[in-house]
Image (tube, grey):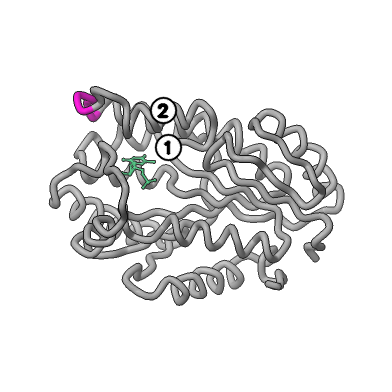
């Protein structure tokens, strides 16, 4: 069904990354890539491809969500399924500038929780309109490393900002662009912390919170999963990454007919 020749792959985690696809287009800017998309995805659309899902990955830092988002993207690529991989905050030139401001900009330790909330929403609203909606409209699968559940949990449950305001801002930022399925990688806060300490990298502003903050993040995700049983799948993130990857792929294949027929090579 998804012939290798007509495969498109793309990553918009970092807008400066070179975009690739099997027909040989290559562009270094997001704008130029979209025109290559237009041409190729038009081909897909004309062939009446079944709708591919919008999939999000959520969880605390160190939960393994980015690893699983990357693994799923790699699998889609092997299967010849057109997809894009995004991240939040970020995923567009504007969003990546906001990410830098949120995480590493000098003097950002004075940032208020309200400013932080609005910056996450600003990054998201750009990503939805510039990348996610156009990709879905062209029949591509979208894999997102974080989306609006992160705001509900981090700014709502952990920072304790007003839940109703967050709900309204989330709705304003995404409009009708709701994920078809969201995987929450659930892991004890202490295990996540020790995984992160093993990584040799500079901690960003968001990673310098007290332990209780991460406890609230975990609880926030678990509560959300209980309230949204249809969309959210809670995954035990303490297990081996291969096992988790298999569980996620099986879940996707059982839920989406457009993925059920995909064959990995
Ligand atoms: P990560 O993508 O490497 O996990 O880093 C993103 C950080 O931003 C992480 O600490 C979670 C935080 N975050 C929020 O607090 N709210 C949000 O809405 C999003 C998207 C991320």
Residue on which disc 2 sits: 98
- Residue visible at 59% across and 72% down? 254
Residue 89 marker? 1
How many numbered marks, from 0 up? 2
Residue in the foreground of this view, choosing between 108 and 53 = 108
- Residue visible at 26% across and 60% down? 192
Q: Position of residue 166 (x, y in %)?
A: 33, 35
Relative side of 82 to 146, left or right: right
Local secondary structure at mark 2: helix
Residue 74 marker? none
Cβ atoms under marks 2 and 1 closer than 8 Å: yes
Query: Which stretch appears magenta?
Result: 109-113
The residue carrying mark 1 has its beta carbon less than 8 Å from ligand 1: yes
Q: CA distance from mark 2 to mark 1?
A: 7 Å
- Residue visible at 38% across and 47% down? 149
Residue in the foreground of this view, choosing between 98 and 57 = 98
Q: Quadrant of residue 250?
A: bottom right
Q: Quadrant of the C terminus?
A: bottom right
Marks 2 and 1, the one that precedes in the sequence = 1
Residue 26 on the magenta span: no
Is residue 169 visible in the rendered structure shown here? no
Residue in the foreground of this view, choosing between 197 and 230 = 197
């Amino acid at each position: 069904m998804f012939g290798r020749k007509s495969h498109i792959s793309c990553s918009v985690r970092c807008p400066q990354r070179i975009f690739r696809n099997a027909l040989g287009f290559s562009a270094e800017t997001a704008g130029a890539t979209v025109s290559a998309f237009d041409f190729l995805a038009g081909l897909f659309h004309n062939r009446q491809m079944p709708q591919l899902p919008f999939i999000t990955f959520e969880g605390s830092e160190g939960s393994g969500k980015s690893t699983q988002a990357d693994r799923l993207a790699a699998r889609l690529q092997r299967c010849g399924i057109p997809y894009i991989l995004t991240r939040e905050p970020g995923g567009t030139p504007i969003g990546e500038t906001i990410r830098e401001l949120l995480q590493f900009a000098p003097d950002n330790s004075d940032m208020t929780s309200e400013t932080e909330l609005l910056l996450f929403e600003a990054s998201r609203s750009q990503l939805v309109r510039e990348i996610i909606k156009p990709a879905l409209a062209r029949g591509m699968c979208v894999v997102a490393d974080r989306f609006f559940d992160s705001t509900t949990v981090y700014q709502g449950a952990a920072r304790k900002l007003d839940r109703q305001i967050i709900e309204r801002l989330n709705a304003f930022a995404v409009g009708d662009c709701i994920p078809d399925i969201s995987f929450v990688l659930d892991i004890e806060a202490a295990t996540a912390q020790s995984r992160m300490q093993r990584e040799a990298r500079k901690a960003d502003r968001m990673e310098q919170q007290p332990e209780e903050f991460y406890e609230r993040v975990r609880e926030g995700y678990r509560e959300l999963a209980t309230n949204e049983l249809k969309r959210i799948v809670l995954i035990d993130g303490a297990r081996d990454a291969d096992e988790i990857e298999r569980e996620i792929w099986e879940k996707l294949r059982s839920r989406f007919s457009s993925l059920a027929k995909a064959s990995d090579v």
